[in-house]
Amino acid sequence: MIYPLKGKMVVTNPFGFKGGTKWYKFHTGVDFRAAIGKEVIAPEDGRIERVNSEAGGNGIRLYGKRAVHTFWHLSARQRNKQVKQGDRIGAAGSSGKWTTASHLHWETKVKGIVRNPLNLL
């Protein structure tokens, strides 16, 4: 697996317990600083589909061989299709209710259990 962003990445909100913030107590993914329009790439081969939520806005779900990855707050998304590791699947943004600035939220599940995506690299 590879990171979903190219270049230098800064984690702005790590995976795990937060001690009771305004919106949640457990952050189910990792947030990276990313300018609106920054290319988001597939961390592994798989099939993508578009997803939406009020909180996360525009999203992409990637069904990979190792895990199911969900990316939220996108400004652009590819349509449902098969992708290879490194293919462009979307662009970072600030869509959804739970965002205060442009970034990429990366969430990963292995066999239905939420996992820290950075531990799978």
Image: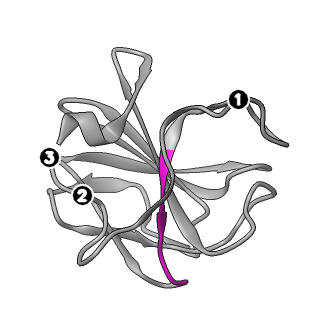
According to the picture, the residue beneath numbered tag 2 turns out to be 3
> Which circle marks residue 1 in the picture?
3
Q: Secondary structure at mark 1?
A: loop
Label 1: how many Cα within 10 Å (few below 14, some 14–19, many 20+): few
In the shown orientation, is residue 98 left or right of residue 91? right
Q: Quadrant of residue 25?
A: top right
Residue type at numbered disc 1: Gly
The quadrant of the image that shows the C terminus is top left
Q: Position of residue 57 (x, y in %)?
A: 70, 58
- Residue carrying label 1: 19
Q: Amino acid at mark 2?
A: Tyr
Kindly check if marks 3 and 2 are in contact, taking CB atoms under 8 A apart as contact: no
How far apart are the alpha carbons under marks 3 and 2? 7 Å
Circle nearer the N terminus (2, 1):
2
Q: Residue at x 21, y 35 (%)?
A: 120
Image side of residue 42 versus residue 10, left or right: left
Mark in front: 2 vs 1: 1
Residue type at the position of mark 3: Met
- In the image, the segment drawn in magenta is 30-36
Q: Residue at x 51, y 83 (%)?
A: 35
Q: Are marks 1 and 3 in contact (CB under 8 Å)?
A: no
Residues under labels 2 and 1: Cα distance? Answer: 27 Å
Question: Is 77 positioned to the left or the right of 4 in the image?
Answer: right
Q: In terms of depth relative to the viewer, which is nearer, 91 or 7?
A: 7
Give the crowd class for mark 3: few <14, some 14-19, many >=20 residues within 10 Å. Answer: some
Helix, strand or loop status at disc 3: loop
Q: Which is nearer the N-term, disc 1 or disc 3?
A: 3
Q: Return the residue nearer the eye: 23 or 59.
A: 23
* Vertical placement of residue 106 versus 41, above or below: above
For the residue pair 55 and 121, the one nearer the viewer reads as 121
Instruction: Name the residue at 50% across, 73% down.
Output: 92
Q: Secondary structure at mark 2?
A: loop
